[in-house]
Amino acid sequence: MALVLDLFDRFSLGWAFWALSETNAGPRLVDENGIAAASLTHIMTRIFPPSYTADDVAFIYNSTRFQLNASANLRGRIDVSVPTGFQSVVLRYINCDVTEDDDQHSITIDIHSSRTAYFYLDPPEIISRLQKLAESEFDRALQTLDELRGTVFHSSLGREYHREMQDVVDSMQGNLTAKHYEFVLDKLDRVEQLKTLALQEEEDYARTELFVSSVRQDMLDSQGHLGKWQLFLLTQAYENLDQGNYTSAVEWARQAKDLPRESVPQADPTLAGVLSTASLVLLGMVAIPTIFRASRCRESKND
């Protein structure tokens, strides 16, 4: 019966129970002295909103705790009926205002936020259990973040993953302080996933940077300089490396590697020679800062 009533709440269905004597439909509601059966009283005495708009409000009561969510931009009031047996429940709410009636039998929720409103009524033991779970998950998330302390991320995407990790952990800490325990739970998986993504991204970056740099160094060792097309292709490779396009970076470097080796250029006093030399200088001005950054990143990683 408890399961059925929970389902009625979940799907916004009303219900009534009227069996006054033992039937095949269920036990008696009251005994021969008119006293309600304790087991049925516990199941049927429920916290619920007497009226609400189903499209904008969702609530759950599972014989232990009551939770109500109101969609963003909803305006108005929602009354929640709280029977006498629930006077010891702990009230918590987010993004809404709450007024308790003097008789403690109902609570009025004022919805006026542009964000989803959350309302909770829990027994003290449930609050204690939620707090311990939230603290445990936060501690593990903080430990996961600390495991990356001192790690230098050369990949831009790796740095983004690391920053997101920090943001999630900061959010968990803020909600833990505000006793919004539900917003702390189930965040640990995301923190661990971001750690894996950040480390994988850094590994991909290091492998690609090593290949591009080895191609550049091989050219310098074999011919003593970089030709203008080699320089152009390597510049493209380093730019794609900085952007996290590792496949493209490798492809640009391979094209540079496959070019015929060029001899050391001789001085050309003609106008064409001057223009050619000027073009090479301009390409060098573009490529050298990129190569320098990559070299610094590699040295920093080795340190």
Image: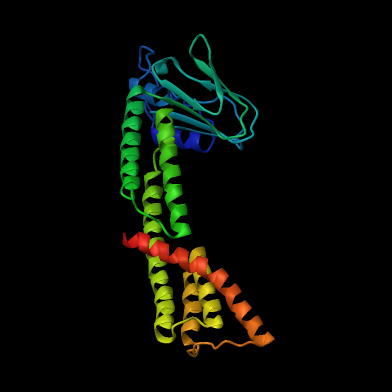
x, y (%) of residue 300? 36, 59
x, y (%) of residue 208? 42, 71
- Residue 235 lies, with reference to residue 192, above or below; the image says below
Q: In the drawing, does residue 146 fall left or right of residue 293?
A: left
Task: Name the image quarter holding the C terminus.
Answer: bottom left
Residue found farthest to the front: 269
Residue found farthest to the top: 102
Q: Nearer the viewer, residue 186 or 65?
A: 186
- Residue 34 lies, with reference to residue 73, above or below; the image says above
- Which scheme is used to colour this image of the protein? rainbow
Q: In the drawing, does residue 23 fall left or right of residue 263?
A: left
Q: Nearer the viewer, residue 173 or 47?
A: 173
Residue found farthest to the right: 271
Q: Quadrant of residue 57?
A: top right
Residue plotted at (48% across, 13% down): 104
Q: Nearer the viewer, residue 48 or 205?
A: 205
Label tally? 0
Q: Quadrant of residue 140?
A: top left
Task: Name the image quarter holding the N terminus.
Answer: top left
Q: In the drawing, does residue 262 fall left or right of residue 133?
A: right
Q: Nearer the viewer, residue 107 or 36?
A: 107
Residue plotted at (50% across, 66% down): 290
x, y (%) of residue 58? 54, 35
Specify whether residue 28 is in view: no
x, y (%) of residue 35? 37, 14
Residue plotted at (41% across, 37% down): 172
Specify whether residue 233 is in view: yes
